[in-house]
């Protein structure tokens, strides 16, 4: 357990909760829906929305994973920190998938706050989101 994970717990931005299979499934369903939305709006050349939806697909898949370990987050940073500590550090998820999540967060922030997005970025992010979701579903046996 690293410093950031401990800090998230101390600040109550990460909390221990009972494992709720319905909540896990709800997050996977949200992830699948966001991924489909990203794919659909890409065909309409709505690259900003595709970028944002791709990130949120990964976000919801990450939340499902976190819930499966009996934790709930209250910040994007603590979600990422928890995934690193609970899944990457224990070799359940490859570091490259966490790097993809970081890239998605950066691209989503650029799209949201700087109106900086592209077709290529949206296409790449959709592929990364699908890979992240597939890994989550595999780990969760969904």
Image (cartoon, grey):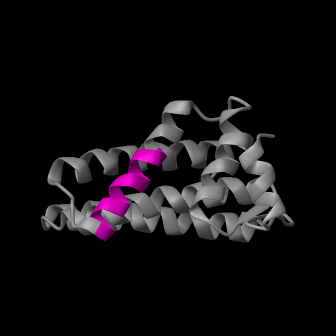
State left or right for residue 34 relative to residue 66. left
State left or right for residue 59 relative to residue 5. left
x, y percent for residue 70: 82, 58
Residue range highlighted in magenta:
101-113
Q: Residue at x 22, y 67 (%)?
A: 115
x, y percent for residue 9: 81, 59
Q: Which corner quadrant of the image does residue 85 belong to?
A: top right
Q: Main secondary structure of the magenta part?
A: helix
Along the line of sight, which residue is nearer the eye, 42 or 10? 10
Q: Residue at x 65, y 47 (%)?
A: 83
Along the line of sight, which residue is nearer the eye, 4 or 55? 4
The residue most toward the left is 45
Whether residue 51 is visible to the viewer of this picture, yes or no, is yes
State left or right for residue 129 relative to residue 8. left
x, y percent for residue 77: 59, 57
Q: Is residue 120 above or below residue 47?
A: above
Q: Residue at x 34, y 65 (%)?
A: 52
Q: Residue at x 46, y 47 (%)?
A: 102
x, y percent for residue 68: 75, 55
Q: Which corner quadrant of the image does residue 40 belong to?
A: bottom left
Q: Is residue 3 above or below residue 40?
A: above
Numbered-mark total: 0
Q: Is residue 105 magenta?
A: yes
Q: Quadrant of the N terminus?
A: top right
Q: Is residue 19 above or below residue 120?
A: below
Q: Is residue 107 magenta?
A: yes
Along the line of sight, which residue is nearer the eye, 8 or 134? 8
Whether residue 141 is visible to the viewer of this picture, yes or no, is no
State left or right for residue 96 relative to residue 92. left
């Amino acid at each position: 357990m690293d410093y950031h994970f401990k800090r998230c717990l101390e600040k109550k931005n990460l909390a221990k909760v009972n494992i709720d299979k319905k909540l896990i499934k709800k997050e996977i369903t949200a992830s699948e829906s966001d991924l489909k939305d990203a794919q659909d709006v890409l065909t309409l050349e709505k690259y900003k929305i595709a970028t944002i939806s791709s990130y949120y697909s990964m976000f919801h898949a990450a939340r499902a994973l976190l819930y499966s370990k009996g934790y709930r987050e209250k910040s994007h940073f603590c979600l990422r920190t928890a995934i690193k500590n609970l899944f990457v550090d224990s070799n359940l998820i490859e570091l490259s998938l966490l790097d993809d999540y970081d890239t998605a967060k950066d691209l989503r922030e650029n799209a949201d706050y700087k109106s900086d997005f592209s077709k290529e970025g949206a296409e790449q992010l959709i592929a990364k989101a699908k890979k992240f979701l597939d890994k989550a579903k595999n780990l969760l046996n969904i």
